[in-house]
Image (cartoon, grey):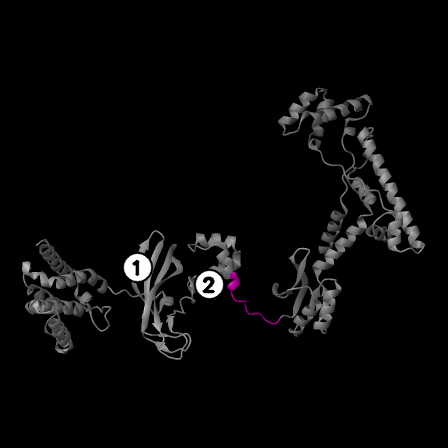
Amino acid sequence: MDRRVALRADLVAAHASFHALLDALTDADLRRPSRNPGWTNGEVLWHMVFGFVILAALAPLVRFWGRLPRRYAKRIARVLNGVLLFTLVPVVATLAGGVVATYRTNLATTSRLLPPFDDRSGPLFAGGVMLSCLAIIAPVWSRRMHLPPFLPHLKGLRLAEITTTDEGVTLHLYATRRTAPCPSCRRRSRRVHSRYDRTIVDLPWGGTTIRLRLRVRRFVCQVAPCPQRIFAEQVPHLVDRYGRRTHRLRAALQQIGLALGGAAGARLAVALGLPVGRTALLGLIRAAPLPDSEPPEIVGVDEFAWRRGQRFGTIIVDLEHRRPIDLLPDRDADHVAAWLQRHPGITTVARDRSGLYADAAARGAPAAQQVVDRWHLLHNLGDALEQFLLHKRAVLREAAGALTKAPGEVPAAELPALPWQQRAEEAGRQRHAAQLAHYEAIHRLHEAGADIAHIARTVGVSRETAYRYLRLPGPPARMRLPARRAALDPYLPYLERRWAEGCRNGKRLWREIREQGFARSYSSVARVVARLRRAERASQPTGATRRTAARPPTPRQVAMLCLGLVRQ
């Protein structure tokens, strides 16, 4: 009994929902095409309601068949299923309903002809379920969604639903074509095997992430000799096979990656609503096709390190357009010559001063002019200047002292050297004397006709040192390490001024310079105060405690200065 009451309540609710739906729909909604091809929404509603009326009229007959033995009921059902009348009557009645009156009037009138919902309406439960489903899905049918014209990349697709979540907006799409071509035999098939959903990311709308939920069909290839039995339909104008980004999004990310690189490009893409990692962005850059370029005429050839100091390759650059055009796996003259032969339009080859690339250019492009590129020319000039100035440290020291000396200035008397300074000076003189002895012995043996190996063994030096001493234009100069700048040097003028004012307390002087930013201990100030006391006892000026010798520039600094003048 409870089951019948529940069924009657469901049927009453479905009837009420149907009338509420009918009141909400407009005439335009009823005339709008439905998903069923060739039918409008009004025709579909009328067809289903008319079928429910026929089912209600045949309810007594259904009860009678239900009491028959099962084998007889099956035979009667099989005979009725083959009668064409039961198929034509609902269709003809549906089409005629729109001629006699409007579908709204027919639906309202027919719904009143339904039998009363009493306890005997149990066999009509199927019709009630049908009306309940109709009340739920009819609003979706009555609103067939079309894609806007500003989305041309979604051509050939139909929008089924739009869902919004915290992560963004999802468009549910499906293809409108009934067939799809087989990728192997190119024959079109309309036999659907199965369906699955495919998620694709598109460009954002107003900073909101857009995902396309594409319903993809798998088709069965009906060509017997074709090896491809099952294949999935593709949308080549929207996304690549197995791709997860649309062509528009892929092109935008490639432009960002080519302009900024991996990490910086990924940060900008996330800020623009294009979530992507730096590794994926670099993968898109590598997958981008190379731009078309004209045949090169002026190229630069140089080496680069695949692994520093172990494996080298060759890079070839188009100097007119200032971009690399090829990388060779090794540093081999035969490979470079073969590459030049494949590009006969080359007129100028810029290279370094090595003989390897000179030989490659002479064999691969004999008519091309070989020039030394500017960078190698200046680099070799700088190395030559530095090697020359290494033996002119004394001259550099004198020049630095002359530049820092003021006109008419009388040099202050130097304080006596401390014991550790005297020991360091004596060790330096002994080392220089040993170098002079080696220099004289090497030149004497070389003039006697001895080879380098014998000279190195006799003198007790390496072969590189023997070669270097033979290349020197004169005896090696004594090397003096420049005086290091102490942390107390900026405060020496203040200490000397306070000493001249009569302040003799070292602790007080230390506290005063600590307030000015000095962060070292008192011991360094104590050493300066001791020197000031010795200078005072020796009647020497306080300036004698300073480092009077200016730090001379290094040979490399002078070489870079000369190269800067050459560039200007």
Name the quadrant containing residue 93: bottom left
Residues in magenta, as a range: 285-295
- Are the residues flagged by discs 2 and 1 in contact, CB closer than 8 Å? no
Q: Secondary structure at mark 2?
A: helix
Amino acid type at circle 2 is Ala
Few, some or many C-alpha atoms within 10 Å of disc 2 (few <14, some 14-19, many ≥20)?
some
Marked residue nearer the N-terminal end (2 or 1): 1
On the rendered image, what quadrant is the C terminus found in? bottom right
What distance separates the C-alpha of mark 2 from that of mark 1? Answer: 25 Å
Residue located beneath label 1 in the image = 162
The front one of 189 and 368 is 189
Report the residue at 19% width, 60% height from top: 136
Report the residue at 68% width, 25% height from top: 522
* Magenta span main SS: loop
Magenta stretch holds residue 72? no
Q: Position of residue 86 (x, y in %)?
A: 13, 75
Q: Is residue 236 left or right of residue 559?
A: left
Is residue 448 in view from this perspective? yes
Residue located beneath label 2 in the image = 251
Q: Is residue 340 left or right of residue 272?
A: right
Magenta stretch holds residue 289? yes
Q: Secondary structure at mark 1?
A: strand
Q: Which mark is residue 233?
A: none
Report the residue at 51% width, 60% height from top: 283
